[in-house]
Image (spheres, rainbow, N blue to C red):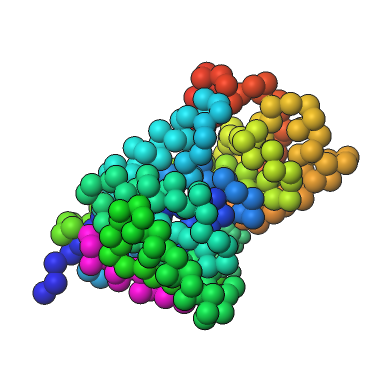
Amino acid sequence: MTEYRAGFVCLVGRPNTGKSTLINALVGRKVAITSSKPQTTRHAIRGIVHRADAQIVLVDTPGLHKPRTLLGQRLNDIVRATWSEVDAVVLCIPANEPIGPGDRRIAADIAGLKQAKKFAVVTKTDLVGPAKLAEQLMGVAKLGEHAGISFEDIVPLSAVADDQVELLSELLIKQLPESPPLYPEGAVTDEPTETMIAELIREAALEGVRDELPHSLAVTVEEMGPRSDSENALMDIHAVVYVERQSQKAIVLGAGGARMKEVGSTARAAIEELLGRRVYLDLHVKIAKEWQRDPRQLRKLGF
Ligand SMILES: Nc1nc2c(ncn2[C@@H]2O[C@H](COP(=O)(O)OP(=O)(O)OP(=O)(O)O)[C@@H](O)[C@H]2O)c(=O)[nH]1
């Protein structure tokens, strides 16, 4: 009989390298937030992979970045605290982009972690040919050498094409400590539902808007409940999208509120998928001046 193994694994990498998509592929359900805009993952959202003989608790973090605001500092603190507690760290580097200073900085950051086993994955392999992939794999090996990391493995994979994702699970499990399950069977995340809903709305609100908006947008779920006692009742959700300035409010709303309407229906579809029931979503946009710099506002918004 093989021993049961369980532990925490953290995916790190520059923004947009496919961490959230990989977590979804590993877990097999939408739990992390993916977006074509960078730096949208704000919480250490965990996805949980359940196997007969193992459990991998995946931690998704935002990338470290130069903190310019209190929020930026808090995010970096969360990232560092998370890293110090995990059993393995997976550095994600996309196959289709050159290895750059951002990757080198993150490699240097994780090189200092004592207890965690280090893996590298080359993501999005469906976007490149074999020659480019081979070159990138060698580049990643070199990156590890320069940073003083000895990677347990370097795995090329595609989360979108579901290629080699299973292999990564197996390799990770081998490195986890013997342990009883850390979470009940069937749990996919320990994020409160409200937080996941807020993240889905945030994801929808960010889609297709300018680059400066991500850090100026927060979402809270103010109220949520089934409309009646019946099991399949409509779920009423009231949420607020916070922006910092009037100009940002105009961007989020769009002409005559058209954009907001679209955001609402995109978010509603995703929330219905998450909850498995029909949803009535009521969205308001409010201005919380300078919320990124105000500790009281930050706490209220869950940071
Ligand atoms: N073709 C292809 N695209 C991918 C793959 N994995 C992720 N992507 C795309 O790459 C973009 C970024 O993916 P995310 O999973 O959001 O990246 P992330 O690293 O979590 O990004 P942040 O949350 O900003 O740190 C999205 O548009 C994904 O659809 C893949 O295997 N193949």
Say if the magenta span includes residue 295: no
Q: Position of residue 225 (x, y in %)?
A: 56, 41
Span highlighted in magenta in the image: 162-176
Determine the main secondary structure of the stretch shown in magenta. helix
Please give left or right for residue 231 compared with residue 89 in the image.
right
Q: Residue at x 69, y 50 (%)?
A: 207
Q: Residue furthest right?
A: 256
Q: Position of residue 41 (x, y in %)?
A: 52, 46
Q: Which residue is drawn at 57% across and 45% down?
A: 39
Depicted 12 relative to depicted 135: above or below: above
The front one of 241 and 12 is: 12
Please give left or right for residue 44 compared with residue 231 in the image.
left
The front one of 299 and 238 is: 299
User: How many marks do you count on the picture?
Assistant: 0
The front one of 34 and 126 is: 126
Q: Which residue is drawn at 56% across and 28% down?
A: 68
Q: Where is residue 84 in the image (x, y as percent from the top left)?
A: 29, 42
Which corner quadrant of the figure contains ligand 1? Answer: bottom right
Depicted 125 relative to depicted 108: above or below: below
Depicted 228 relative to depicted 154: above or below: above
Q: Position of residue 160 (x, y in %)?
A: 54, 70
Q: Is residue 77 visible?
A: yes
Q: Is residue 21 visible?
A: no
